[in-house]
Amino acid sequence: MSYISIYRKYRPQSFSEVVGQDEIVKTLQNSIKSNRLSHAYIFCGPRGTGKTTAARIFAKAVNCLNNVDKNGKVINPEPCNECVNCRDITNGMSVDLIEIDAASNTGIDNVRKLIENAQYLPNFLRKKIYIIDEIHNIGGGTTKAAFHALLKILEEPPENVIFVLATTEPQKVIPTILSRCQRFDFKPISADDIKKRLKIISKLENIEVSDMALNLISKYSDGSQRDANVILEKIASLDDDKVKVEDVVSLLGAVDLEILFELAGILIESNSEEAIFFISRLEKLHQNLEVFVEKFIEHLQNLYFVKNNPNGFDFINSGEEYREKYLDQSRLVSNRQLNEFILIFMDLLNKIKLGQPAWILFRSGIIKALNIKIEANGAVTQKLENSVRELNERFDNFKDSFKDVLKIAASSGAQSTKTDDVMTKAVARENTENSGNAKVVRDEEKPAAKKAETKQKTHPATGSEITKIEWEKVLNIIKNKSVSLNSLLLEVKKYNTDGSKIMFYLPDIYSWHKDKLNSPENKELVRSSLNSVMGKNFQIEFLLENQGKDLVDLRRGNPYKERNSEVGEKSVIFKGSEKSTETKKEDKTDNKEKEYEETAESENGIDETYGYMEKKFKIKE
Ligand SMILES: [Zn+2]
């Protein structure tokens, strides 16, 4: 390879080569062609997006000797790159093109003098061009003199001078300068555009590079063509026959998007066999796990955005070719599953950052995530939730239509038996249909889905009980956001709820804690965390234990015990005669006990699966 760097060699020399800034190029070309040039321009935008490159091309286009007719009218707004003016500018030899880097402190007096010289006519070019990079730095500190000189010139610009200012931080440029410039905002270059340019360069340089490696470089360079070119150059110098993804990964510590899709796919499918294969391949790549896990969390978040917002792609910087892939994968995963994955890998990341053994943690995290499907299979859970909701609606309709009958029944012993008969039938029907669902689940061997369903069945109307596991999840989420709030919450032992509001209770001596917890920020954080775990918005209040009754323990062993008494209370609503209420209550209680057994059984099932997975992994290792 010849040793002008790729970055310099392939720096665009005409507007047609500028990547990803079509509108800016068009506007500049139009103003050149119609000879409506401004005295000062400001190019704003992230680094590597082509601001100073565009400024140089602009300088050539307004000075080129070959793009004008004999009257001096511009016939082509592109520079020829062959005339003496174009060549001098390209080679940095023109005395009339003055480039200043305001970020460097060298030659402050020179800078002032150079700017003051703007009042003199150009020596050779038609227009004297000043390109001042990182202009926001010129306003402060030691370069104040230069700043005043610039401001003075901008106020009364000489005829044959054009200033092109560039900045990555336009918000730091003072308004007196901004208001005197025509402003252009350069966008980060899309991964697709970067890849196209890399393809051209690698072809011209005879660098053989795999398509996946190109994808990775374009994505990794984060909107900067300059960075992408530098990376390509570094990797080409590795003296390999072909640039492969692995090279990019090991050089940059970068993470291949394909690998992220692959891992997400494995976890969504709960494919333990592939998972083992995946882990061993990842080890061979010498992947930095901290970087990898961080990128994987980002990938899961991207899936969430794409899944839940039609404009989700605005939030992620993905190449065009990945859009379909994101959409496809997001359809296969439920929000709950994504949430579980993110929690697992966030926890993993925190531990890795603390210096705990990364690979062991990573393998354990994968095993944990593989088993999430059982707990939160989107498809199955969704189906069950829908049918439970449907049943509830039907039951509500049924209740409504019999409201009047029930009223009469309540005041008349004669009709009560009949009504109860109807009610019992309805309950029976509900149970039959629900047990039908449970059978489907059993057939598919999804113990935790069964658990979810059981939960719905136990408490269909509110879904507001907090299980021990849910409460632990809430605490975990909060721990990641506020350690102090988490430690306050550790004193909360009990709660009760009316279905829309949850009252949390602290022992009577914790009045200071109670007040802290009731601050709006803390309540909001608890509310949002509860919402993300339970999928429902509750109002929140913290109280002392002597302020409430019928409190439920947040860490209770049997979460269904309290529910039975609630069901008992519910049946009172439909009370017709003492006897039949008693019977129904017993029936329901029987059911609850059966369900609790089922739940215990299914939780056991998870443990078994987990143990099995652990064994399997150990054997394979
Ligand atoms: Zn020229």
Image: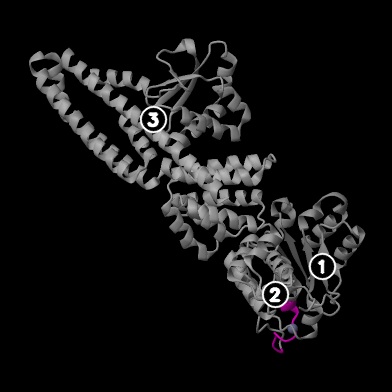
- Marking on residue 600: 3
Instruction: Name the residue carrying label 2.
Output: 12
* Quarter of the rendered structure image containing ligand 1: bottom right
Total labels: the figure holds 3
10 Å neighbourhood of mark 3: few (<14), some, or many (≥20)? few
- Marking on residue 99: 1
Q: How far apart are marks 2 and 1 (CA)?
A: 17 Å
Q: Quadrant of the N terminus?
A: bottom right
In this rendered view, identify the residue nearer to me: 455 or 45. Answer: 455
Residue placed furthest toward the bottom: 70
Q: Position of residue 572 (x, y in %)?
A: 24, 17
Marks 2,1: beta carbons within 8 A: no
Tell us which disc is closer to us: 3 or 2.
3
10 Å neighbourhood of mark 2: few (<14), some, or many (≥20)? some
Magenta residue span? 60-70
10 Å neighbourhood of mark 1: few (<14), some, or many (≥20)? some
Tell us which disc is closer to us: 3 or 1.
3
Q: Tell which circle, 2 or 1, labels the residue nearer the N-terminal end.
A: 2
555 vs 16, left or right, is: left
In the rendered view, would you say 50 is above or below 578?
below
Marks 3,1: beta carbons within 8 A: no
Please check the rendered image and state whether residue 64 is part of the magenta-colored stretch, yes or no: yes
